Image (cartoon, rainbow, N blue to C red):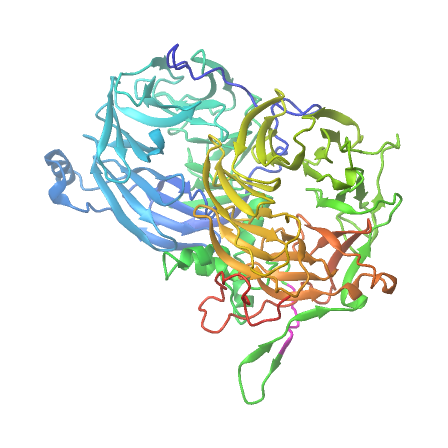
Amino acid sequence: MGISEEVSLGVNMLPMSFPGQAHGHSPAFKAPDDLPKTVARTLTQGSSPMSMDFHPIKQTLLLVGTNVGDIGLWEVGSRERLVQKTFKVWDISKCSMPLQAALVKEPVVSVNRVIWSPDGSLFGVAYSRHIVQLYSYHGGEDMRQHLEIDAHVGGVNDISFSTPNKQLCVITCGDDKTIKVWDAATGVKRHTFEGHEAPVYSVCPHYKENIQFIFSTALDGKIKAWLYDNMGSRVDYDAPGRWCTTMAYSADGTRLFSCGTSKDGESYIVEWNESEGAVKRTYQGFHKRSLGVVQFDTTKNRYLAAGDDFSIKFWDMDNVQLLTAIDGDGGLQASPRIRFNKEGSLLAVSGNENVIKVMANSDGLRLLHTFENVSSESSKPAINSLAAAAAATSAAADRSANVVSIQAMNGDARNMVDVKPVITEESNDKSKIWKLTEVSEPSQCRSLRLPENLRVAKISRLIFTNSGNAILALASNAIHLLWKWQRNERNATGKATASLPPQQWQPASGILMTNDAAENNPEEAVPCFALSKNDSYVMSASGGKISLFNMMTFKTMATFMPPPPAATFLAFHPLDNNIIAIGMDDSTIQIYNVRVDEVKSKLKGHSKRITGLAFSNVLNVLVSSGADAQLCVWNTDGWEKQRSKVLPLPQGRPNTAPSDTRVQFHQDQAHFLVVHETQLAIYETTKLECMKQWPVRESSAPITHATFSCDSQLVYASFMDATICVFSSANLRLRCRVNPSAYLPASLSNSNVHPLVIAAHPQEPNMFAVGLSDGGVHIFEPVESEGKWGVAPPAENGSANGAVAAPSVGASASDQPQR
């Protein structure tokens, strides 16, 4: 649908894939197992849901609007309704006479649409009578009236948010055949678009190559497109069905779809060729006569879903045939309302009798599981989660944060094993004295040094495969090592375990995955690698060209980007494995498209080599860190730097070579871990504010590496003196220390062998592995009788939630043992 010759939206490019993959299929999804098909929650709203939307950051927070004008806000994880509001006009004196007359004539008002703003700080409600209401949201139960706008004569049929000229706006459309754009801060009307000849049913704002525009559909089946210039519609096309049509882009913004139902009940989902304004493909599988207007949604750049015939139907975007249909255990509406959360792990579906069913895939079940088993933990000291700590700054009584806080009590919410707490009771005092768990003997944990068929000098990088059944290491001599666990009678799952040794694996050809090494001194190169989400490919570099390896055959699929500059860190874009962020030794970050072999953007903001990169697919940002101890946040839409901050370093520590600074996102995708030899810290992303900090004492060994556990409840950190520490991530307080004597033989006690890298298992929160300076790899699990690494320390005196605020660097982060 080209808007004009001067400002064409461009030819729509389908997602491409690495060699050997099915065309257009993202490695992040495996159909249909990753579709949310399991009914995980059933919520009773009280009136019939008309529209639903998940919070863009708090992935389990669901906003609901109903047929009697009610607004409900649910914390799906805890099944708790945080807020219930009935419809009322905030200031009737400011309403137009037509609205006042309409409310007298028909006081029952329905919600037509609810939607969150991109950052989740606002939400909008479009009603069937004239008005939209905007609320500001401050966490938990705290929602406040922000703006009430008498927007249209008749019903307001849709509402959306957009950011033309980087200014947040609200877009509405209505029965009066107009589309209007309002300033989201002040409510001032910026634009009115006229040209439809029937009530406008939906709006879909989007942008391409800095061109901002709005698609709109009307009840006569016309599709129009508008720029923010009051110059009229740029296109005029007919939607299949020619009645109620909605439009949506795939998550990466590259593919456009519409879903429509005709007055006769015939429904259509189609993909559009934007440059030609023509239907590219029409998906099959609808009931011959839909019993209502069909709603649809997209997820993961891979799937379409629609509510039809008392079920949810799914399509692969690249296949017109119906992929599967599920009935949600029965009881769904004839044409259910549906809505995915941003990650596609949860799907809200409307059912009969005012019920909302929340379906989940395996990731969604894990996300919701952190809210369960609360009662069994209620006697133990609660430590608020990162989400609670952030919310506490804006809302003292944040009920959802208190719910979330339970998950941080003992780290692993999936394995609720009875742990004998390391606590002694004073005979004359009810207070309990917490003790740090020390692991000093091999019998106090399960550890295993992986077998070595090939000796290497030291392990530079280490990762578990995403399937959890293998470990991949990159040695300092540019050789990759792969260990795989076998499925057998002693290991029915085939997953990694410290109880059984894996095999160091090589293909039958006997070839090694060896990087193109630096020409001068490969030992001085900065090795880096990144693994694709389906474990099929690894992108890797050791000072020379970047290599793409096939993990099954070890063959080199491609090499590219010869130095200088040399790559020092690699990260796949979470929504498109063809896009890679490459940190360089010249301090730049290059955004590289593998498919077209082209650097799309070059980001400049650091002064020394890049040492860490992490994407948030919730906030749509890239966080970078460098040997300059600087943190930068980049917007992944236009690759603009949003903000930066220099890590505060302690005074008086001896000046050494520049130290690597690592970054890793928390599971909530809103906070991230910062790792430096002098400190661990948790930062909030949008304000780049340090929430927690654990500094290394001046006389102690520096940190070599650290990582979150897979559920983000723990932080594993390794040190130069070969100790390994386990922290509760909620407050960065030490809960367990593994001493070198627990895993290193006595012959190495004075050899300066120590971990250089540490990796967490992707499914087992209490399993981690370390790569050593002597080329060895060790895997660790707690003893089975304990089931976890120590006990979370109690809340600090004077702290309501146990959180440790970021202290001045060099100060003790708490009164517990420090390094």
Q: Is residue 454 above or below residue 7?
A: below
The number of discs equals 0
Image spot of residue 598 (x, y percent): 60, 22
Image spot of residue 431 (x, y percent): 53, 81
Q: Quadrant of residue 504?
A: top right
For the N terminus, the image quarter is top left
Q: Is residue 240 visible?
A: yes
The residue at 86%/49% (across/down) is 451
Q: Farthest residue toward the bottom?
A: 428
Residue 346 inside the magenta-drawn segment: no
Q: Is residue 163 visible?
A: no
Query: Which of 598 and 251 lies nearest the eye of the viewer?
Result: 598
Q: Quadrant of residue 67?
A: top left
Magenta range is: 417-423
Query: Which of 352 and 267 lies nearest the eye of the viewer?
Result: 267
Q: Is residue 12 above or below residue 790?
A: above
Image spot of residue 324 (x, y percent): 57, 31
For the C terminus, the image quarter is bottom right
Q: Is residue 748 left or right of residue 365?
A: right
